[in-house]
Amino acid sequence: MPMVDPEIESAPWESQARFDGPLYLKQIEYLFERSRFYRGKLERAGFATNGAVGGIDAIEGVPLTEKDELRTSRAPEEPIGAHLTATRDEIVRIYSTSGTTGTPSFIPLTAADLEVWVRTSARSYAASGVVKGERLVSTYNAGPFVAGAALGAFDRLGLCHVPIGSGNTERLMTAIQLLKPTVAVLTPSYALHLAEWARERGMDLAGSSVKRVLVAGEPGGGEPAMRAKLEAAWGASVTEAMGIGDISVSLWGECEQKQGMHFSGRGFVHLELIDPETGAAKPFVDGAEGELVLTHLVNRSAPLLRFRTRDHVRLNVGRCACGRTSPRARCIGRTDDMLIVRGVNIFPSAVREVVNEFSPAVAGVVVIRPHAKGIRQEPPLPVSVEVAPGADVEGLQERIRARLREKLLVTTEIELLPAGSLPRSEYKSKLVEKA
């Protein structure tokens, strides 16, 4: 599939700040005019007027926005929060988060905002190589979560879309067998679950019509061992996409080079990388790691300024053969899921990636069960690992433990469990069971 916006997606990345600059100035002016939340936040930080904030070259001096700030600004009379800037009749859609930490957060969109989301998502999924006229089966529901907005991108790309939604495994597999789609869109956890489901029923999933598996919704699709497991099971190419609910759906999309997900929000969202501990800016160079910080440039419903995503990524900024020039990211995990064991930062997805090196002896399903509440843990860190049916497990515990110690510098207590022991998910997997 050609680029959706080739003049934008192939423009030199070095010039991006110059294009973002005027949009940023207009957005700051809009925030002072329409956002009670940001007007107060910026005034408290010493910026009495929008002109005092400065241009995009001074953005590092602007305070970061935390998710908890948005939550605490909500009230029964303001359920979306004080950062809402659109009037009731301007809003055409409202998504919500899962609410795992309490009441769901609501994410409103104007018609223009929704168009930006669909266009961003179309750029992201076009990168995967899908071709106009291909038949695609999807497992994302139209709501309540923001992944529903990605469905509009499939129409925009001229694909024949077969929407199945979540929780319909029998219907999904029947659609694959009878309708012969060439593309499947789902989370990596669900893709893994379907591979097991098919194997248990004698279905040749690798021999099906599906030639591309597009995964999103959680880390995993970019982990080499997980990707290899999925590609072998499906007999298909696996690429991944990533969105940030409060900012935009499918904001990153991986091309066929599989060297990370290209940033797809150029002209809509300004991108920064910071040290999660200090908040200091980090340069965009190959191998740089840090937390993504994002700023809306054109959002009119509930714009966010220097929003801390808590997504910890590794960047690849070298030239890509696909022609897209934006940085590529591989999501390592979320900083708010991270555990600290004797001063060592451990991402649950990194544990799974190491365990999956022992495929085919392991099933790919892993759960960390910390002894104590909170981020800080004492070793050994308990890790439950499900083994594959009929696998030779002699010495497997010690080999996994030694490999985790070698690669992640963490001492673990490995529990091997029979196949099918750990819960499966038709959406996102849970890698940590909190004490």
Image (tube, rainbow, N blue to C red):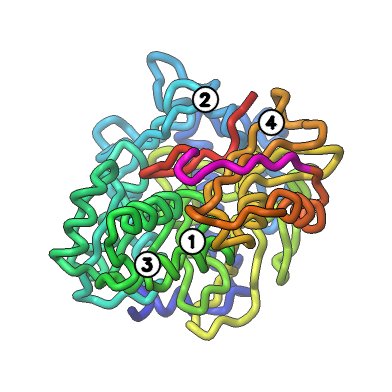
Q: Mark 4–mark 2 contact, CB under 8 Å?
A: no
Task: For mark 4, give the secondary structure.
Answer: loop
Q: Mark 1–mark 3 contact, CB under 8 Å?
A: no
Residue 413 lies within the magenta run: yes
Task: Characterize the local packing of mark 2: few (<14), some (14-19) or many (20 or more) Cα atoms within 10 angstroms.
Answer: few
Q: Mark 2–mark 3 contact, CB under 8 Å?
A: no
> What span is colored magenta in the figure?
412-421
Task: For mark 2, give the secondary structure.
Answer: loop
Residue drawn where x is 59% and y is 69% of the image: 327
- List the residue tagged with mark 4: 370
Label 4 vs 3, first from the N-terminus: 3
**Which is in the foreground here, disc 4 or disc 1?**
4
**Which is in the foreground here, disc 2 or disc 3?**
3
28 w.r.t. 267: above or below = above
Task: Characterize the local packing of mark 1: few (<14), some (14-19) or many (20 or more) Cα atoms within 10 angstroms.
Answer: many
Mark pair 2, 1: CA separation: 25 Å
- List the residue tagged with mark 2: 101
Residue drawn where x is 37% and y is 67% of the image: 234
**Dominant secondary-structure state across the stretch colored magenta:** strand
- The part of the image, by quadrant, that contains residue 241 is bottom left
On the image, the x and y values in percent for residue 239 come to 45, 67
On the image, the x and y values in percent for residue 359 come to 57, 62
- List the residue tagged with mark 1: 252
